[in-house]
Amino acid sequence: MMRLPSRGIHLSKVSKGQPQGRMTEQKRYLMKFGKYFGMAAVLFSLSVNSFAQKQVQGGPPPKLERMPEALEDRFALSAAPSHLRDNATVYLLDPAKGYVLSRHGTNGISCIVVRSDWQWANQPFRDDIFWPVCYDSEGSKTLLQDYLYAAELRARGMDAKQVHEEVIKKFGTASYPNPARHRGG
């Protein structure tokens, strides 16, 4: 067996026609790829483990954070078609209260930046969820209310399971109707 001192690589067989003590380009590539893949796998498992440990510790859910108002306003409106943005209603998140009306629109469109995926009771809240969404007038009266209520409950310190249970209790009640129209086949 030959040992290459600069890399510590052991070669047990050498193919005919191949210079002795040299690795083929393919072997070098595979070794380099394997090294980087291994490092990525270790880093990924450490980050997943770290996230899981935070959640298992049973501490309070991550705090909601305020986004700069101008940024949140623009981000929320980015979910609406450009011709509807000027007259849309915008709600901004106040971490102590939930969503608050920032701008009252006139076209029935309402926009927010979602921070809480309340739909999954078994998934803890995270502090890295930010997605803009806008609703038409019917969605503003119904579906948007789920997110407004969820943010209010989360601001009170409820965890994902508690928020989920409280929001779904209201579904279909007279004060919290389902959307009136259905689109589909």
Image (tube, helix red, strand yellow):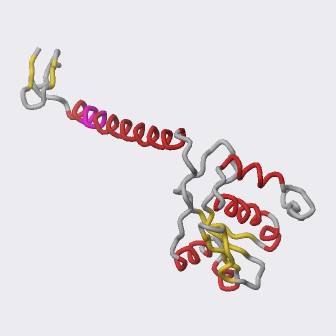
Query: Where is residue 52 shown, x and y percent of the image?
Result: 50, 40
- Magenta range is 29-34
Q: Is residue 70 above or below residue 161?
A: below
Q: Quadrant of residue 94?
A: bottom right
Q: Nearer the viewer, residue 37 or 135?
A: 135
Query: Where is residue 71 shown, x and y percent of the image?
Result: 52, 76
Q: Quadrant of the N terminus?
A: top left
Query: Where is residue 168 shown, x and y percent of the image?
Result: 80, 52
Q: Quadrant of the C terminus?
A: bottom right
Question: On the picture, is 54 further left or further right than 170?
Answer: left
Q: Nearer the viewer, residue 183 or 173?
A: 173
The residue positioned 38% from the left and 36% from the top of the image is 41
Secondary structure mostly seen in the magenta stretch: helix
Question: On the picture, is 42 further left or further right than 69?
Answer: left
Q: Quadrant of residue 136?
A: bottom right
Membership of 33 in magenta stretch: yes
The residue positioned 86% from the left and 62% from the top of the image is 176
Membership of 60 in magenta stretch: no
Question: On the picture, is 37 further left or further right than 122?
Answer: left
